[in-house]
Amino acid sequence: MDDRVNRITAEIAEVVERNLRRELLRERETMLRSELEAVRAELGRIGAGQPIHRAASKSVPRSQPQPMLPASSRPTRGASARALVIRTLKHSGRPMTIKELTKAILRRGWKSARKYPVKTVDATLRSNPKDFRRTAPSTFGLNR
């Protein structure tokens, strides 16, 4: 029975992680499409002999997706999952589900060492009752 529950839990976590990755890739695709349109417009201006506006030109996209938050609120490399969850919950100002937290932290550029980042966030929330309180099923807020 336990083996079956573990297998089902792993499958659910895999589906959740796959959906999170899909959403992040869609956001990146949208960003890259807008940058591509800007580059094509600039190429059209160059071909038409119009002056080039350096300030309006976009930089070449990096291989990593741009974080959606300002540099001051981005996590530092090697930050603990606990610190990232606290920072994310403070920034949101409301309780969040484990899935929402994971998505927000991944969007900030966090890379989990585990295969399923959702499990990392879940374990962090449940193992630190002094920092986090459960407000609803799979929903946690700050205890401070």
Image (cartoon, grey):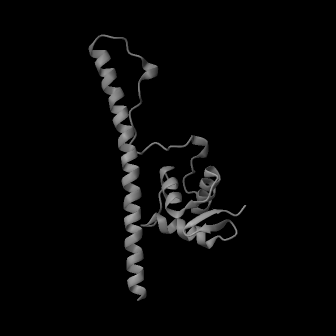
Image quarter (top left, top right, bottom left or bottom right) of the C terminus? bottom right
Task: Measuring from the top left, give residue 80's x and y in whole percent.
Answer: 58, 61
- In this view, the residue farthest toward the bottom is 1
Residue in the foreground of this view, choosing between 106 and 23 = 23
Q: Residue at x 38, y 84 (%)?
A: 4
Tell me which residue sits at (34%, 36%) in the image.
33
* Residue located at (37% from left, 40% from top): 30
Q: Quadrant of residue 131?
A: bottom right
Outermost residue toward the front in this view = 136
Locate residue 42, reporting x and y percent: 34, 21
Image-based side of 16 in relation to 102, left or right: left
In the rendering, at what x and y percent does residue 122 appear? Answer: 53, 68
Looking at the image, is 48 positioned above or below residue 113?
above
Left/right placement of residue 47 relative to residue 113 reads left
Rendered position, 35 above or below 17? above
Q: Quadrant of residue 84?
A: bottom right
How many numbered dots are placed on residues in this image? 0
Q: Quadrant of the N terminus?
A: bottom left
**113, 83: nearer the viewer:** 83
Residue at image position (37%, 65%) is 15
Q: Is residue 105 above or below residue 51?
A: below
